[in-house]
Amino acid sequence: MANIQYVTKEGLDKLRAELDQLESIERPKISQQIADARDKGDLSENAEYDAAKEAQGLLEMRIAKLKDQIAHARVIDPSKLDASKVSILSTVKIKNTANGMEMNYQLVPESEADLAKAKISVNTPIAKGLLGKKEGEIAEITLPNGSVLKFEVLEIKMD
């Protein structure tokens, strides 16, 4: 059974761009390194050849993984999501009820999570606790260490 992976259009474009880069630029570069190392003679004691072959194997694994991800990717259509409650692709403004601190996060597929850009995976405990909540509701989130945080949903936007 194939693992369907939900992605945004931007996320799918990024995967395709990386695959194109690896196939059109990195693969020929490694092939050339292997050819250059092979020209240096005895392959049994040629560290450059071994390193290039290992790099080629890793590259081919990454290419295969990307092709698999792209083949099983399903693009999420934001227009079909309910903007009245927290869901994937929602940007949600929340307030920690304990300390009053407000935060903004966008809930994204795991492959597109980037905390520096306030994009958190829908698989994180905070995101799981927020899913399905509406503005004004309190989400009680149990963290892996067992502590419970309460967040009030202040605003939900679909970007």
Image: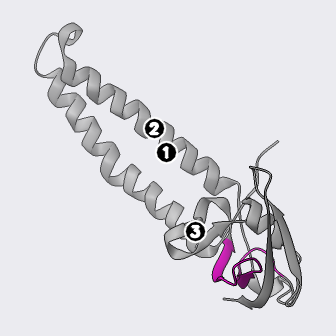
Give the secondary structure at mark 1: helix
Q: Position of residue 154 (x, y in %)?
A: 77, 90
Residue farthest to the left, as pictured: 40
Q: Can you tell which of label 3 and label 1 is closer to the viewer? A: 3
- Secondary element under disc 2, as helix, strand or loop, is helix
Residue 11 numbered tag: 3
Q: Earlier in the sequence, mark 3 or mark 1?
A: 3
- The residue that mark 2 highlights is 60
- CA gap between label 3 and label 1 equals 16 Å
- Marks 2 and 1 close (CB-CB < 8 Å): yes
* Nearer to us in this view, 41 or 90: 90
Q: Which residues are magenta?
A: 86-107
Give the quarter of the figure containing the C terminus. Answer: bottom right
- Name the residue beneath numbered marker 1: 63
Q: What amino acid is at disc 3?
A: Gly
Q: Which numbered dot is residue 53?
A: none
